[in-house]
Amino acid sequence: MPGPGPGTGATARALFDGEQPATEVYVWALGGRVAVYATDARPGEPALLEFFALARNGSDDIRPGVLFGVPAQRHWCAVAVDGELLVPRGPARSGRFAPTYGGVGGGPDEPGDAVPDAARLPLRPVEIMALRPEDVSADPETVHTHRHNRFSGYAVVVGCSWPFLVLLARLLPNLPYWGAAALTAPVTAVACLAGWRLFLRPRVSWNGAGVSVVGSVGARLLVWSDVHAVRADRHGAVTIETDHHGAGLVVTARSEHPLLPRVLSGDERTGAQLAGALRLAAERAAARARARVRDVVSLPPAPVAPAAPLLLYVAWLAETLAYALLLR
């Protein structure tokens, strides 16, 4: 395996100092950007990882290659494709920013003009293994529930208005206390409303028959055939889509890399776990329908959109008065 080019630094050269694991992969490389896909990747699925290479490769299709190094984020990896070694300029990052498999130039065996929706593909065994055991339970009568952790929700409510108030304190002259309170009140009110809608209000219950959702906006009781797709983003937001245009109900879960300490989130599901559990329930319902098994499972309870709790108003008042002191 040839060594790295000049300017890659000691950390990059460490990749070439000893034996490295070699993994067969598919590679898309263009203009120095390299995306790596699993050999069993399906059209529409994201890349395993990506990195930027020293050499600028001119290919715009996905080709077989060999990856040297540990295929994980923040690790240094190199890729050999078409007899050329692509040496990294930095450690690998998440593949979520790269084109999906088959989305650019097509995969090695198929065109790229009709890429299936990865959110509608069956879950892989490894994805099912990453779910909670109770969510994998085959009993369709079991009702599963999810709600964002209250501690992390209130932490966001309390902290998200702080940067705006610091900016106001630098831009505005000294104000009397009640003048400052009149200024902080709407800012903290917006923060409390956003925290309530995005983190504290949403919840979801599901079983083998359907899903009951109270989203950031709206609430619905759906049978699984009404659910078009379930998607999770890297921030933990899970969208339960109800049409082909991406409209749906949003429920918040823990992100893969939370900014808040894990102690505030407890044993909450991540966005990927919640989306996977919902997709698995939908897949099993579809399998029963294809097998013409009469589904006698009752729907989960109808959603009830709660009113904002008294604690949220107390938090708004306390924030307004405390920040008014700081703003002075």
Image (cartoon, rainbow, N blue to C red):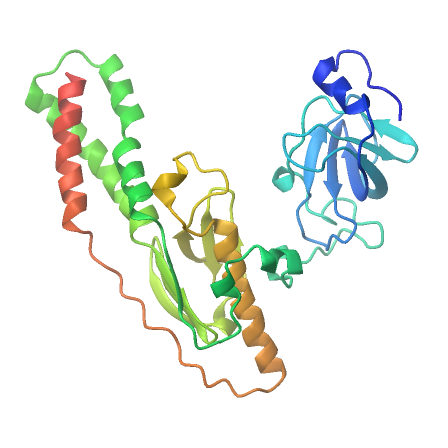
Quarter of the image where one finds residue 99: top right
Q: Tell me which residue sits at (78%, 21%) in the image.
A: 54
Quarter of the image where one finds residue 299: bottom left
Q: Tell me which residue sits at (13%, 41%) in the image.
A: 314
Location of the C terminus (image quadrant):
top left
Measured as percent of width and height from the top left, residue 98 is found at 66, 39
* Residue 223 in sight: yes
Q: Tell me which residue sits at (32%, 72%) in the image.
A: 302
Measured as percent of width and height from the top left, residue 262 is found at 41, 39
Measured as percent of width and height from the top left, residue 235 is found at 47, 42
* Residue 55 in sight: no
Q: Is residue 263 above or below residue 171?
A: below
* Relative horizontal placement of residue 44, taking residue 226 as reference (left or right): right
Quarter of the image where one finds residue 186: top left
Q: Tell me which residue sits at (67%, 37%) in the image.
A: 72
Pick whichever, 316 or 257, lies toward us. Answer: 257
Pick whichever, 318 or 57, lies toward us. Answer: 318
* Relative horizontal placement of residue 304, taking residue 85 as reference (left or right): left
How many numbered marks are there? Answer: 0
* Relative horizontal placement of residue 288, taking residue 81 as reference (left or right): left
Location of the N terminus (image quadrant):
top right
Measured as percent of width and height from the top left, residue 167 is found at 29, 19
Pick whichever, 30 or 261, lies toward us. Answer: 261
